[in-house]
Image: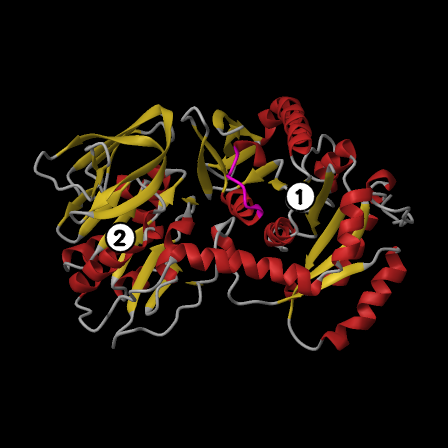
């Protein structure tokens, strides 16, 4: 078997990533050797993949999650092109895990043919190795201004002969117009590959939706393959920080008498916002993403997360008054944590001739370290111990490195090979490692220390929260939703045999 499927969407955040993961988990349960694939992703939430030779590479966080749903190790081929926005007009291009260029919309066009051929070749190799490859589109295939040269949506489907399904988010409203319009705006050869629809995030009486499902079938000649219900507990491994609400996760009641309030600054170029997800799985820990200085004043723990543009986001902190709020929080002896770019902001100076090219700029001065940006990006999995002997694992994605530090400064983590990592000075903590809070013992110990520094004596950390189990439950739930709410027999036919003969929809635009 060498089947394939493209999961397209009416919009960004319509549910492509979670539906792809759910289909992968369903196929994996059937004993199918399945792999996810997203030709090109635009996201600053990335994961590190280390190959057999020990080389590190980056892929979108969603594709790492989909690999876990498929029961396979993450591979740079699952997301051959990753665009990491550094500003409104430029993005770093990561090709098969390695950063190769920084482009604007103008010079991206010159690079696109090379990216497209790499994508097509990579998908062909994966289809030769796996029974099924489930591909995720990007944005919407109806972005007709981008159709010329497209290798992510219908350009990929047409080149590889993939049947496509289109998912729409009914919670946004206008889902039937979005489903019809998506197909109607496509060229006839593209329309011929779109074989069905999925309605996502439905809440209410399914009977009220039934007439609309029949009408969209009559109008397009294509069935609705299922209606997925709204589930509040599907929030882990978001592809973009904008997918989160203001409050992250669904916090369970505290085990002790008090809550621990965590404020994560939503930087303009926030990266790997998923670092805070493990905190939000803890009972009694309320994690809020914010851009309001007042909410930092009301928090127990303030987190400066990663950033794709450290110097620019540091300037934004100062412009918005958030920098003063961070300084006041630390001056009061309450805990502040900086992760990767956030750690770099906490230092005394940043020397950057690579990312922002601003030269030397002052940091917030909360940690006695200086950071210098190097041309080569550090990409690695990491392991060590913190708080003496508490095991911790993480991963590194950064250009900046600590070039000078106070010799008396205590590290937050000690590498397995004995090197120091990060820093602790009073109530201020910093590390370049992402993903550390997925280590359960480390997370519990850090939260206990943060509660002590914040004066939250009534907060008690839960001894039985296992982050890996929470993620696995979420993946199983996605597989359950596909099995229970989609026409899986129709999905099988599409994957094995491709799309049936389908009518063309004539739109006035065409």
- Is 71 colored magenta in this rendering? yes
Residue 462 on image: x %, y %: 30, 67
Horizontal side of residue 34 vs 429, given as left or right:
right
Residue 234 % position (x, y): 53, 61
Q: CA distance from mark 2 to mark 1?
A: 35 Å
Please report the residue visible at 18 percent of the width from the left and 55 percent of the height from the top: 330
Left or right: 426, with 234 as reference point: left
Residue 169 visible in the current orientation? no
Residue 458 percent coordinates (x, y): 21, 73
> At x 79% / y 36%, what residue is drawn?
161
**For residue 79, above or below residue 461:** above
The residue range painted magenta reads: 70-75
Q: Residue at x 21, y 61 (%)?
A: 448
> Image quadrant of residue 179?
bottom right
Instruction: Indicate which disc residue 134 carries.
Output: 1
Magenta segment includes 388: no
**What residue appears at the point 62 percent right and 49 percent down from the top-left corner?**
28
- Residue 469 place in picture, x, y as percent: 43, 58
Report which quarter residue 170 is drawn in.
Answer: bottom right
Task: Name the residue carrying label 2.
Answer: 442
Residue closest to the eye, 477 or 157: 477
Quadrant in the picture for the N terminus: top right
Q: How many marks?
A: 2
């Amino acid at each position: 078997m060498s089947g394939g499927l493209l999961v397209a969407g009416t919009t960004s955040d319509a549910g492509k990533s979670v539906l792809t993961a759910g289909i992968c988990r369903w196929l994996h349960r059937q004993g199918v050797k399945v792999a996810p694939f997203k030709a090109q992703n635009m996201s600053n939430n990335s994961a590190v993949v280390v190959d057999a030779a020990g080389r590190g590479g980056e892929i979108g966080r969603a594709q790492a999650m989909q690999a876990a749903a498929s029961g396979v190790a993450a591979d740079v081929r699952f997301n051959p092109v990753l665009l990491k926005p550094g500003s409104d007009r430029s993005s770093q291009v990561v090709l098969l895990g390695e950063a190769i260029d920084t482009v604007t919309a103008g010079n991206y066009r010159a690079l696109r043919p090379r990216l497209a051929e790499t994508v097509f070749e990579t998908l062909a190799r994966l289809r030769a190795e796996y029974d099924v490859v489930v591909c995720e589109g990007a944005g919407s295939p109806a972005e007709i201004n981008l159709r010329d040269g497209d290798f992510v949506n219908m350009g990929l489907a047409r080149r590889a002969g993939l049947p496509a399904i289109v998912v729409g988010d009914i919670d946004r409203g206008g889902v039937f117009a979005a489903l019809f319009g998506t197909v109607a705006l496509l060229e006839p050869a593209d329309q011929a590959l779109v074989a069905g629809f999925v309605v996502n995030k439905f809440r209410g009486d399914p009977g009220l939706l039934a007439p609309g499902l029949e009408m969209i079938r009559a109008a397009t000649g294509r069935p609705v393959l299922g209606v997925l219900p709204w589930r509040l507990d599907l929030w882990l491994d978001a592809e973009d920080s904008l997918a989160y609400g203001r409050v992250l996760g669904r916090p369970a009641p505290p085990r002790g008498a008090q809550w621990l309030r965590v404020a994560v600054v939503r930087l303009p170029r926030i990266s790997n916002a998923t670092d805070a997800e493990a905190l939000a799985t803890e009972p009694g820990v309320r994690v809020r993403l914010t851009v309001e200085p007042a909410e930092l004043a009301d928090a127990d723990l303030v987190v400066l997360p990663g950033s794709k543009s450290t110097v620019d986001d540091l300037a934004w902190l100062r412009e918005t008054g958030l920098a003063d709020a961070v300084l006041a929080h630390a001056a009061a002896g309450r805990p502040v944590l900086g992760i990767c770019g956030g750690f770099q902001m906490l230092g005394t100076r940043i020397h950057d001739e690579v990312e922002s090219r601003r030269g030397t700029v002052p940091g917030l001065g909360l940690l006695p370290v200086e950071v210098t940006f190097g041309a080569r990006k550090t990409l690695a999995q990491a392991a060590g111990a913190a708080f003496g002997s508490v095991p911790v694992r993480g991963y590194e994605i950064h250009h900046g490195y600590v070039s000078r530090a106070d010799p008396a400064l205590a590290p937050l983590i000690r590498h397995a090979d004995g090197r120091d990592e990060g820093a602790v000075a009073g109530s201020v903590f910093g590390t370049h490692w992402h993903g550390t809070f997925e280590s359960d013992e480390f997370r519990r110990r850090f939260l206990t220390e943060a509660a002590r520094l914040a004066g939250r004596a009534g907060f008690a950390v839960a001894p039985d929260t296992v982050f890996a189990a929470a993620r696995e439950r979420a993946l199983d739930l996605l597989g359950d939703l596909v099995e229970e709410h989609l026409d899986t027999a129709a999905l099988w036919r599409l994957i094995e045999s491709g799309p049936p003969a389908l009518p063309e929809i004539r739109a006035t635009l065409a």
